[in-house]
Structures are given as structure tokens and as C-alpha cells.
């Protein structure tokens, strides 16, 4: 079994590793992490995200543009209002796995 892992690691394309590092950079901002956490409960418009995070709309819009360009959130227009949601279940999985790792490392149990 150990040899299988070596083969898999050798087959990873360097471009995919670069893209992975860019993805993790996007997760490296606490505001973006907080936005992802909010969107795990369902879609929201910029106004509601800003209100929940006690931030201005332009700051939230800027972070949503970054999340959107990274393929982590997607917009849906309803008239003049744009609602954002997580792009797919992988985003929530990445978030939850990272949080689980931090909780495990810190020895803290969350409710």
C-alpha cells in the first residue's frame, strides 16, 4: 500500500499543485472564511452578509469577487439583487476539514 501513495504523489501535475496553493491562499483571509461560514447556511445577498459581519458593502463585495474568481462562490441574480451561495459541496468540505483539524490541534470541543 505504501508504494501506491508514492505513485500517486509522482503523478500530481505541478500545475495542479500551483492551483491548490492558490486555492489555499484564498482561504487565508479571515473575512473570506467568515463569508464561507455564513454561506454554509444558505445563499445570502451582499447586504445580509455585510450586516452579519458588521462590515461595509464594498468590503464584502471585494471579498466576494475574490471568492467568485477562485470558484468558491457563485452568484444568482433576482432583479437587481445578487445572491451568493457556495459553488459546490467541496467548499463546505474544505472548510469543515480545516476547522476540524484546528479544533483537534487545539484540543477544543465546539458545540
Image: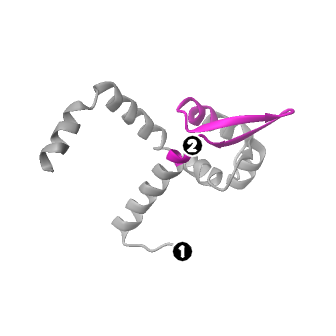
Taking the spot 27% from the left edge, 32% from the top edge, the residue there is 12
Taking the spot 23% from the left edge, 31% from the top edge, the residue there is 11
Secondary structure beneath label 2: loop
Residue 84 location (% of width, % of height) = 69, 41
* Magenta-tinted stretch: 64-91
Taking the spot 53% from the left edge, 51% from the top edge, the residue there is 92
Give the quarter of the image for residue 86.
top right
**Hey, which residue is sitting farthest left in the picture?**
3
Give the quarter of the image for residue 76.
top right
Give the quarter of the image for residue 103.
bottom left
Secondary structure beneath label 1: loop
User: Eyeballing the image, is 99 above or below 109?
Assistant: above
For label 2, the residue is 88
Left or right? Give the position of 7 relative to 98: left
For label 1, the residue is 111
**Hey, which residue is sitting farthest top in the picture?**
15
User: Eyeballing the image, is 104 above or below 58?
Assistant: below
Q: Are marks 2 and 1 in contact (CB under 8 Å)?
A: no
Q: Would residue 61 be counted in the magenta stretch?
A: no
Residue 46 location (% of width, % of height) = 74, 42
State which quarter of the image contains the C terminus: bottom right
User: Eyeballing the image, is 95 above or below 110?
Assistant: above
Taking the spot 19% from the left edge, 44% from the top edge, the residue there is 5
Q: Sequence order check: which comes first, mark 2 or mark 1?
A: 2
In this view, the residue in front, 5 or 53, is 5
Left or right? Give the position of 36 relative to 10: right
In this view, the residue in front, 107 or 56, is 107
User: Eyeballing the image, is 79 above or below 110?
Assistant: above
Residue 14 location (% of width, % of height) = 28, 26
Q: Would residue 69 be counted in the magenta stretch?
A: yes
Kindly report which numbered mark, 2 or 1, lies closer to the viewer in this rendering.
2
Q: Residues within 10 Å of mark 1 (few under 14, many from 20)?
A: few
Amino acid at each position: 500500500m505504501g508504494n501506491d501513495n508514492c505513485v500517486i504523489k509522482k503523478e500530481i501535475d505541478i500545475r495542479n499543485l500551483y492551483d491548490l496553493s492558490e486555492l489555499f491562499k484564498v482561504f487565508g483571509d479571515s473575512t473570506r472564511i467568515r463569508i464561507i461560514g455564513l454561506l454554509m447556511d444558505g445563499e445570502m445577498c451582499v447586504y445580509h452578509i455585510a450586516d452579519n459581519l458588521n462590515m461595509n458593502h464594498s468590503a464584502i463585495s471585494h471579498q466576494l469577487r475574490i471568492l467568485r474568481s477562485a470558484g468558491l462562490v457563485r452568484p444568482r441574480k433576482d432583479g437587481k439583487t445578487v445572491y451568493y451561495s457556495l459553488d459546490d459541496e467541496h467548499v463546505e468540505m474544505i472548510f469543515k476539514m480545516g476547522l476540524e483539524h484546528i479544533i483537534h490541534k487545539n484540543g477544543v470541543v465546539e458545540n
